[in-house]
Amino acid sequence: MARILRVNTRNKKVTNEELTGDYAGLGGRGLTSRVVRKEVSPTCHPLSSQNKLVVASGLLTGTNAANTGRLSVGGKSPLTGTIKESNAGGTFSQKLAKLDIMGIILEDKPEPNAHFQTLFINKDGAKFLEIPEIAGLGTYDASARLFEQFGSKVGIMVIGPAGENTRLASSIQFTDPKGNPSRAAGRGGLGALMGSKKIKAIVIDSEGAKAPEVADKEAFKAAAKRWAEILVNHPVTGQGLPSFGTSILINIINEAGTLPTKNFRDGRFDKAADISGEKMVEFINQRKGVAKEGCHAGCVIQCSQKYCDEKGEYLTSGFEYETVWAFGSNLLISNMDHIAMLDRLCDDLGLDTIETGTTVAMAMEAGIIPWGDGQAAIDLLKKIYDPKDYLGAIIGNGTSFTAEAFGVDRVPVVKKQSLPAYDPRAAKGVGVTYATTPMGADHTAGYAICQNILKVGGDIDPLGKEGNIEVSKNLQIATAAVDATGFCLFVAFAVLDTDDALDTIARLISARFGINFTADDIGKTGIEILKDEYSFNRDAGFTLAHDQLPDFFINEELPPHKVKWDFTAEEMQKAKVEI
């Protein structure tokens, strides 16, 4: 039976618990949010001993079903004060599942002067190790030393200097199949929570372990075959994303007039072609990089890549649309190599690229560095390595904190989390998601860009109000369920357009566990997850007043469409499940 590994970070006691009671049948986001709801005080300080960091593999992770290698990380967010689930790829989740561990709960908190520890987990159990030489290192050097010590086949979950110093924008990084710590549980500052527990890294060695048992092997095999066909045959998951990665969206979103430019002043960037997925692939091919690879084993979408510098040396991977936007059009930077270096720095420091890009925009608004100056942005981020550098400390604490520090009043945040790469005035379905998701502004919580711009799964006017509340609600429910399975969220493109996709997912879950799980149960799963999350936020003090975008979206017209945000917080309550 799948189990939970409960880890007390103060007394270093590790216990195994069966996944029973309120946690029975849960995985991924379903498990992280349920544990946080049941075990964490909603009013606690996020960096206190009362908060817990929960790591959970998905229900289908560890099987051979395509694209099931994702992982959920949860806790009370140091950045927002809300409940938080952040999702990541890499090799860690599948190795966790092979050890028959559905979740890890890090609880309590060591003394402030305690040394950072590494938690090592294999088939024989778990133990704390003190590896002083990795303390303070960036994630690349720390991971390299951990691979040297434990072998190249382990999976690594690690924080960088930002997390060690509990900076509010800090991420948790996971190593990919090439050993690079390029996959991030980025949003919500959960790296700071891990840092508060004095855990530098968790290393998973699944050598000698077996894949999870499948109750009905033949039924699972048939469903897995159909599932792979669904993903490979869809034009987005089978052609667009594998060809140009997620940055294929740059030109599409720019043409749609919803690419936020110069801190959400315009919907189009006149140099978008210079930072597009097409341009990225051109550079990759010229420099002998890799334009198509997966972030975990069993990925058939293959939207990751290896991006090299002008000398042909590896610079970064997992070079995503959101990152390219955050450091590109958002800051008026059009040099792809500068943007790639900023991505590399964020991975190494352990910082969320979306939050950090918008934070740098606050520094530009304040005149700390000039708009469009990529090298100045690089130099600014490097200051975060030094825990005593006050400017670095400010930037490492995210958009809202930095805006307050410098007196900036144009601050694109909801619940103190920065908006991602779609202007909500010209993509109103995703704007509803930004405002109402329990997570703070988060496009992945209900990606209405599908219907607003890409016309996948429907066609809803991105500039009007009609249909956008309903589509956001439906997508928030569906997304929560997907996050519980271990599937990559990009499977949603194919699911929305394929009649038997939900039934196929239900067949996979039924065959895996030997239960009767239906397509209707998928929706019920998403609703239950959102109930846990919304009720936590309610008890933490969040109200209807927090479910709205900043005033400048309401007061300013967005070129080129000349549209404003025109939903009230009261209207948007229909996008939330009842609790």
Image (spheres, rainbow, N blue to C red):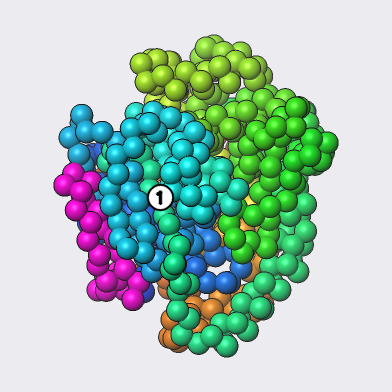
Q: Is the C terminus in the top left, top right, bottom left or bottom right quadrant? A: bottom left
Which residue type carries mark 1? Val
The answer to whether residue 305 is left or right of residue 110 is right
Residue 187 image point, x, y percent = 46, 42
Camera-nearest residue between 458 and 492: 492
The picture places residue 221, in percent across and down from the top left corner, at 60, 82
Residue at the image position 78 percent from the left and 31 percent from the top: 274
Q: Looking at the rendering, which quadrant does residue 521 occupy?
A: bottom left
SS for callout 1? strand
- In this view, the residue in front, 579 or 346, is 346
Q: Position of residue 122 (x, y in %)?
A: 37, 59
Q: Residue at x 43, y 44 (%)?
A: 149
From what the image shows, is residue 476 above or below residue 12?
Answer: below
Of residues 141 and 45, the one nearer the viewer is 141
Would residue 47 be found to the left or right of residue 268 on screen? left
User: Measuring 16% from the left and 47% from the top, which residue is drawn there?
Assistant: 11
The region drawn magenta spans: 1-24
Left or right, 106 with respect to 65, comes to left
Residue 15 lies within the magenta run: yes
The answer to whether residue 217 is seen in the rendering is: yes
**Residue occupying the point 18% across, 44% down:** 10
Packing grade of label 1 (10 A; few <14, some 14-19, many >=20) is: many
Q: Is residue 480 above or below residue 279?
A: below
| Residue at numbered disc 1 | 203
Say if 442 sits above or below 272 in the image: below
30 falls in the magenta region:
no
| The N terminus - image quarter | bottom left
Q: Quadrant of residue 23?
A: bottom left
